[in-house]
Amino acid sequence: MKIETRLAQIGNGADSTTGAISAPIHQSTTFAHPSLGESTGFDYTRTLNPTRKLLEDAIADLEGGARGLAFASGMAAVHTVLNLFQPGDHLIVSNDLYGGTYRVLEQILRPIGITASYVHTGNLEDIQAVATDSTKALFIETPTNPTMQITDLAACAALAQARGWLTIVDNTFMTPFLQRPIDLGADIVVHSATKYLGGHNDVLAGLVVAATPELGERLYFLQNSIGAVLGPHDAWLLMRGMKTLALRMERHMQNAYAIAGWLDARDDIPRVYYPGLDHHEGRAVCARQASGFGGMVSFDVLDSRMVPYILEHLELITFAESLGGVESLMTYPARQTHFDIPEEVRNAIGVTDRLLRLSVGIEHIGDLIDDLAAALDYASDRVLAHARS
Ligand SMILES: *Cc1c(COP(=O)(O)O)cnc(C)c1O
């Protein structure tokens, strides 16, 4: 069946005793054993919970992997995956990376001897240049957050396979509706399900999918041992959100495409980052490996002094961290999501104090553009007119 159908049907048919369409929330932390040495398959909720299992099976199916695992947050998912590595191991990581992942790598793993090199993973030569005998994995975001660099997943996975490395992809921005890294050769997919999969800015969750049963078993051991699992209520809430993913993504993309083009035509916006724009260097690769360009648009303003005026003057679009919900959100990466990345490192990858990131929601496009136009005009009048006079 097609992905739209599989999404809408998540959890349906799970409870044959009642026929419930919406999957039951099994809040129980423990489960009775029929007799010594027998189990219903469920013993203790950290180990396995019926509601969480429905979600885990659903994401494994959607990503085309062997096993899905659900975590209390995207970072819990990322950190659990990174527990596959040992002191002395080296990772090669996309240089424009979610700030929280960078923080785990630099402040938690580096002190215990697990190191990372950051390159534009879209350039295979750059990957080869930092590879060592200790390299164990590639960790990729594509498109990256927030400058929308594109990495060729199939090419990277082939290189990794030839060298015996794992390929790990953070697929938060695209979701399995638009991009399925395992089909392209990746070994592990991670998600902040807090974003598009949940879709309503109301549940914090992380998901992991392993391509093979063996890798799934290793990750399941880590999930159960570390214990950063998703609670049953949140698993249910996430499944409810995921049912409408296809519809939401289509509208997110339509709106994002329109806004990217509109921003691109403005004099006070020197650069727009959206993989669907003709001038985007990664457009062809993104079009080949994904079925859409996503709902995230970043842009530079002409002068960093415009930023506070824009953020204060937006009325519909909310100035807040996060992304992927039905409500449009504007983020200032240099001060929010990427604050933990040193300024020189940030500037080198384009996350400057002139960059804004917009998570385009599903509101009416006319209302979104009116709101942006009012805020940008106001900021330009205040800052640029001043500079000219
Ligand atoms: C938000 C985010 C994370 C972290 O997820 P949380 O659910 O906030 O813990 C990881 N990767 C990307 C790309 C994200 O956007």
Image (spheres, rainbow, N blue to C red):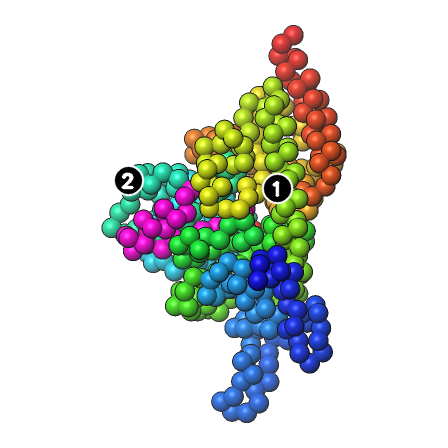
- Residues 104 and 195: in front is 195
Q: Specify the farthest residue to the front.
A: 1
Stretch in magenta: 150-174
Q: Position of residue 35 (x, y in %)?
A: 55, 92
Q: Position of residue 125 (x, y in %)?
A: 31, 38
Residue 163 drawn above or below residue 281: below
- Residues 109 and 296: in front is 296
Q: Which structural element holds mark 1?
A: helix
Q: Which mark is residue 253?
A: 1
**How many labels sit on residues?**
2
Residue 323: quarter of image: top right
> Which residue was labeled with disc 2?
129
For image coordinates 58% across by 72% down, the residue present is 49
Q: Can I make out residue 97 in this image?
A: no
- Look at the image and say whether residue 153 sits in the magenta stretch: yes
- The quadrant the N terminus occupies is bottom right
As shown in the figure, which amino acid type bears the numbered disc 1?
Met
